[in-house]
Image (spheres, grey):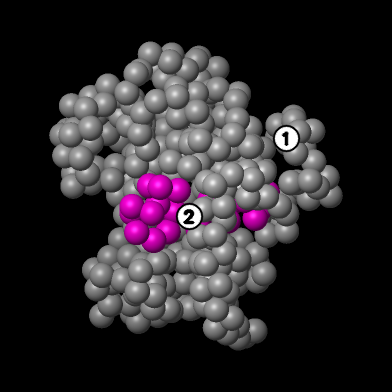
Amino acid sequence: MALTEKQLQKLREIFDSCIRPLVLFDADPDGLASFLMIYKHIKDGRGVPVKNAPELGPQFAQKVNDYGPDLVVIVDMPIVSQDFINKIKAKIVWVDHHPVMERKGVMYFNPRLENPTDNRPTSYWIYRVFEENLWVGMIGMIGDWFMPEEEIVNKFRAKYPDLLPPEINLPEVALHNSKLGELINILAFNLKGMTSDVIKSVKIFTRTKDPYEILEQKTSGGKFVHKKYMKLIGRYNELLEQVKINPKDKLVVFVYQNPDISFSKELSNELIYKHPKKIILVAWEYGGEYKCSLRSATVNIIPIINKALEGLTGYGGGHEFAAGACVRLNDFDQFVENIKNQL
């Protein structure tokens, strides 16, 4: 285990001793599930999704301090600036699974500190801290393309046999061909759109006690988040139908414009699931730059991204097979060409 039992116990003690935490989480199923498990255990505090920003920068500090938390928790954020940490008045805990960063003034828990190749998602470690709300934990784990050990999967199947059939043993298959996958997508799509709507959905999730409240729309909250999902899935499917795959091309590039919502993560995940021999690049034009989501099933794309960005205005990072990048509009064509040259 990359995070030792002693470290997990330390996290339990930290969470159990706080009264008014503020949790900053990456706006994806892994980050959301991590927050929800913390909230459901403490039964107090506030969660803030960090949207369209791979870096938690100093611009977030004032709002955090205005809330007056006794503990700031950062989960599933790949980059946290030292300037942000320096401005925060409360104690900070950062639980992550992206490549290790060196920062001062923060309690940092990351499995890669012991094993650089261990990128088990943050929701896995938060579940191990509490051993509670497994259905929430599985949303984060499968949503991050990770299937936990058999003991955990069997425990989940025993309680929710219809959500994850026994013949499904790969996370990418579960994500695209199970009721659990549908549930994950409902949560993911509810993290899109106006921040006020996202906060409303997150609040509903904190009060959801059972996955069937959402899947079967048993409560008013379940109906609300399901309705938003159904509204957005239509727009997503329209974009998916526009993707053209050339069998001869190693790199699949799909560029789209959408005035208010990014579907890049979901598009790139589905495309790499359907075309595992390709490298996928989905780019959303927003705010004077292209926000890119890249996927590969076989090639470490981090060094490819880093080399492709040399001499250009942009930045990137993430996991070996699932990463992101932001590139200025005028540099995008050269960025794509630099990737092709490496392939």
61 relative position to 301: left or right: left
Q: Which residue is mark 1?
A: 156
Determine if the magenta segment contains residue 189: yes
* Tag 1: amino acid: Phe
| Residue range highlighted in magenta | 180-201
Mark number displayed over residue 340? none
Residue at screen point 35% across, 34% down:
46
Residue 275 rendering spot, x and y as whole percentages: 65, 71
Image height of 182 relative to 21, above or below = below
Residue appearing at x 74%, y 46% in the figure? 163
Q: Nearer the viewer, residue 191 or 131?
A: 191
| Crowd band around label 1 with a 10 angstrom C-alpha radius: few (<14), some (14–19), many (20+) | some
Above or below for 168 versus 86? below
Question: Can you give x and y, in whole percent of width and height, for residue 11 in the image?
Answer: 44, 20
| Residue at screen point 36% across, 28% down | 45
- Crowding near the residue tagged with mark 2, few <14, some 14–19, many ≥20 C-alpha atoms within 10 Å: many
Of the residues under marks 2 and 1, which one precedes in the sequence? Answer: 1
| Kind of element beneath mark 1 | helix
Tell me, yes or no, whether the two marked residues, 2 and 1, touch with CB atoms within 8 Å.
no
Determine which quarter of the picture holds residue 42.
top left
Q: Residue 182 magenta-drawn?
A: yes
Prevailing secondary structure of the magenta residues: helix
Lateral position of residue 177 relative to residue 247, left or right: right
Where residue 265 appears, as percent x and y from the top left, is 49, 62
What residue is pinned by disc 2? Answer: 190
- Is residue 328 visible to us here? no
Q: As drawn, is 272 to the left or to the right of 111? A: right
Q: Secondary structure at mark 2?
A: loop
